[in-house]
């Protein structure tokens, strides 16, 4: 089982869309069984997959923090995509932000999620990949996710703000891991919404390749910007299913191959 989180400190990079579409490409291999976990109170991944996150009765990721004895089978929604039945999800809920505030005063708060998965590792071992989406911050919920996962994938778009976001994320997380006593698990950086016609796009690639903290983790193939990617949220299906021969779908598959070679996926 591999555990992965998508992270950024800048909104609007297409992080959730990348997470959803890369997971979809990974699921084209029927040997892969994927659990998506939405760690964002905005519920974008939950919405992308076609689930109403305003349902207050449904168990979701916040249940893990509020009821550590809950059976994991009660959290998971199975077979949410008919075309990709090997994808399950633990959805999010808009009240996750309330849970975040409640955790601030709890001892060992950064390890609550890891402890839950460890207690239930036999159940979760049925999955080849557990993939988390997060929101752009380093709050307590995200610290739990980033502490637990084997690999963090940073997502950048083509902007100076995205560079600053990636640098700040790396700096702050390196400070955190010293206190948490773990190795640096930032393993990949993906450039999203890439348009080679924009001068900044090539400059951005060159910059990441010139910086010590990024040059070894930059995924060589960027994901091109396309209206087709927005359709994945509307249709609740990844592009590799909606338009398998689209140039962006091809790029997504190449990114997945790269991440497999890096042993991130």
Image (tube, rainbow, N blue to C red):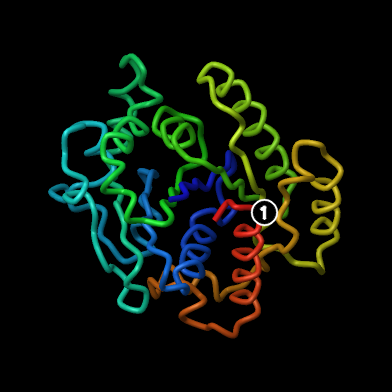
Instruction: Classify residue 100 by image quadrant.
Output: top left
**Extreme residue in the left direction:** 57
Above or below for 213 versus 239: above
Crowd around label 1: few <14 · some 14–19 · many ≥20 (10 Å): many
- 215 or 58: nearer the eye? 215
Image x and y of residue 212, in percent: 81, 37
57, above or below 68, in the image? below
At x 16%, y 49%, the residue is 74
How many marks the image carries: the answer is 1
User: Residue 135: x and y, percent?
Assistant: 47, 42
Q: Residue at x 49, y 46 (%)?
A: 5
Please state which of residues 179 and 161 is positioned toward the viewer in this rendering. 179
Query: In the displayed structure, does residue 24 sit left or right of residue 221?
Result: left
Question: Label 1 belongs to which residue?
Answer: 157
- Helix, strand or loop for disc 1: loop
Who's the residue at 55% across and 76% down the image? 228
Residue 52's place in the image compared with 163, above or below, is below
Is residue 203 or residue 106 the one in the foreground?
106
Query: Is 195 left, or right, of 11 in this rendering?
Result: right
Quadrant the C terminus occupies: bottom right
Residue 171 x, y percent position in the rendering: 67, 27
Residue 96 placement, left or right of 170: left
Q: Position of residue 206 (x, y in %)?
A: 86, 51
Residue in the image at 28% along x and 45% along y: 122
């Amino acid at each position: 089982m591999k555990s992965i989180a998508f992270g950024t400190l800048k909104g609007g990079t297409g992080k959730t869309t990348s997470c959803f579409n890369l997971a979809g490409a990974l699921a084209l291999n029927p040997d892969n069984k994927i659990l998506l976990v939405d760690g964002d109170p905005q519920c974008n991944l939950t919405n992308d997959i076609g689930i109403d996150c305003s349902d207050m009765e449904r168990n979701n990721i916040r249940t893990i923090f509020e009821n550590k004895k809950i059976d994991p089978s009660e959290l998971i929604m199975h077979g949410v995509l008919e075309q990709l039945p090997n994808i399950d999800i633990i959805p999010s809920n808009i009240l996750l932000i309330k849970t975040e505030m409640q955790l601030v005063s709890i001892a060992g708060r950064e390890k609550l999620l890891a402890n839950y998965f460890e207690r239930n590792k036999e159940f979760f071992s049925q999955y080849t990949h557990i993939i988390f989406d997060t929101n752009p911050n380093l709050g307590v919920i995200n610290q739990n996710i980033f502490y637990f996962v084997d690999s963090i994938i940073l997502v950048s778009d083509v902007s100076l703000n995205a560079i600053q976001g990636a640098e700040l994320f790396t700096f702050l997380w390196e400070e955190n891991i010293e206190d948490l006593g773990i190795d640096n698990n930032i393993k990949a950086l993906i450039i999203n919404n890439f348009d080679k016609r924009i001068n900044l796009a090539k400059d951005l690639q060159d910059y990441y390749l010139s910086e010590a903290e990024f040059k070894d983790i930059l995924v060589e193939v960027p994901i091109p910007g396309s209206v087709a990617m927005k359709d994945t949220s509307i249709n609740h299906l990844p592009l590799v299913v909606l338009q398998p021969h689209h140039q962006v779908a091809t790029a997504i598959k190449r990114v997945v191959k790269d991440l497999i070679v890096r042993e991130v996926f």
